[in-house]
Image (cartoon, rainbow, N blue to C red):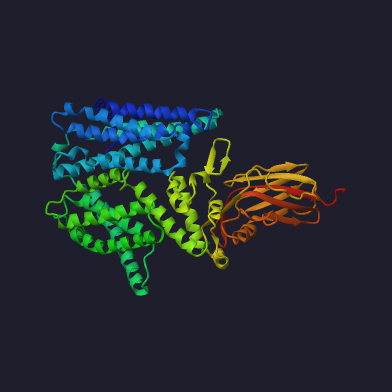
Amino acid sequence: MQLPSIKEITSKAQIAFNRFPVTLVWAILGSFYIMHLIGLSSGTDIEDKFNIILTLILGISWLIGTQFFIEQQRPSNKWIIMKLIVLVLLFLFYWHLPNGKDLDDNPVYIVRFFLYLIAGHLFLLFAPFVKYWNKSAYWNYLKSVGIAITRSALFSGVLYLGLVLALLTIDALFETHIKGERYGQLFIFCLGTVNTWIYLSDFPKKVRNQTEIHFEKALEVFVKFILIPLVILYILILYAYGAKILIEWQLPKGWVSYLVTALALIGYLVQIIINPIQKNASAWTIRRFYPWFYYALLPLIVLLFVAIFRRISDYGITENRYFVVLIAIWIFAMALYLLLAKKRRLIILPLSLFTLAILSSFGFWGVFSVSNRSQANEFEKVYKKVMVNKGLASYNEFNQLTSIIEYLEDRSEISRLDAVTGINMNYAMNDTVSSKWRSYNWVDTNTVLDSLGISIDPKDNLNIAQNYGTHYSFYENDGNNQLMDVSGYSHFLPVHIYNRSYQNSKSDGYILEYYPMDLCLKVVNKEWDEKPLQIELHSFLHELSTRGPNLNDISVDERSVFLENGTIRAKLVFYNLSFTVHSKDSLDLHNGSAYMFIKNKNDAE
């Protein structure tokens, strides 16, 4: 790839601005706006304006694709209004978003953003050929897209690394103490402005005239020695796994769907790359890629459907499973199209995927409506089964009910369960957890299920320890709701652990230290001659998990740790706790609040 001169770069930059003024103004202003937010002293400014940032990111690909479409129309001036329509749609997208700091409360908005972002990039892959088709011109256009992505990423990446090195050198040599925010601002400038500008400077304007095929040797080597061997490797692995399933007569694991999806996408990419030279290629693997790949893919698509519908039959549809099913249908439809169609147009691949991305974002057929209905139906099915058993649920049933409540509450759809439970589920929002930045409402699922008369069958408690990957928690607000016996103790230390972070507590020479990797608290006093008093939380939390996920009804003694050495005795009493058990040897302590009471045995009574 020949590197351009400075004169060539500036010339292309000017041509690109004249050709894409709206897009580049959008990218430049957006970049400097985000850089401004990064430079502000408050760490919440970016979070507060995250809805604006998402809209700015979304606009770039859609504005580029719109310009590509307009340029190929005759006369193009009549289609300028499309830019205004896109800008209005971007404003509507911003208008439908909640405040930036509330985006995390409902994943619907982030999922919809990614759907529109993917659709915008897919739009780029076919925009100039919506009303005009030429096989060779389309392939050359896709080649230009690939070259532009590679070049812009290389140039902006090298520029960023070079400027970062320069700042680090200035900081080290002149002791200027450059703020860390400057590196983030520099990254945004290189990505949003430089990368976009270089990307747009490499696109031919008259794509219809680009009909002569130039298939570089490097591209052929890449396909023949990297992509096709990967395809063959994936096929061998999946067929071996399919044979294992038939021999052992068991259903496939859910993750196999991701491998089949990756195989299909790589295969379609190979088909696009080799399309113009496939019949005349010297390599046998390229000449025969079509149709043998698609014949080999069809049985694996069956494996894909079996794997995903197994999960759906057990737990219903979620957003992830909806998209896996959608992609599976698309893979199957494209395989049949490429095998059976007499006139195969590769534009169908991105165009059909673009359509699915848009359609799945709204409507009763969309991802959110379908998944919410499915989860509500799953809750009703499990709930009725449990109530027939007099409210006694197996561990898995209890966990499934809990997960569905949390799932629907996250999406502000918990009222779907009102008719089943007979209570207003929105009033289950009975607590608020506050941090220095914001407050979070949360559903106390254990309390809700307890009010419905649902509990874990004691017979199933014996197997609880083997059900890993489960979340356990209890909350007592600020701990003032419980009376605790503190007689016999003379010192107090507060304990607050949040996501592995902890600020050491001190009182009268006693220091309480937390070691997150070891899940260990240590009580230290410089005047001691013996080792620090050490509290191992790992075994305590594992023992606590045997009570099941509903820990709100445990006594103060059960949530306490008692220990002593030759010098002191101590009692640690948790009033807030949240942790997840992954295996016998692995668990995560997400957050915890407790009181530490200490008594030095040498102190006078």
Towards the viewer: 512 or 303: 303
Q: Is residue 194 left or right of residue 268?
A: right
Return the residue found at the far right.
604
Left or right of 276, for residue 243 = right
Report the number of numbered marks.
0
Q: Residue at x 34, y 32 (%)?
A: 92
Q: Which residue is nearer to you in this view: 206 or 133?
A: 133
Front residue of this view, candidates 208 and 304? 304
Q: Position of residue 297 (x, y in %)?
A: 25, 61
449 up-or-down from 412: above or below: below
Q: Position of residue 564 (x, y in %)?
A: 77, 56
Q: Is residue 480 visible?
A: yes
- Identify the image quadrant of the N terminus: top left
Outermost residue to the bottom: 247
Query: x, y percentage for residue 311?
Result: 38, 60
Residue 61: image location, x then y, percent: 30, 36
Q: Quadrant of residue 306?
A: bottom left
* 187 vs 475: above or below: above
- Say which quarter of the image contains residue 585: bottom right
In this image, 405 relative to 58: left or right?
A: right
Instruction: Residue lying at the far left in this picture: please name it.
Output: 342
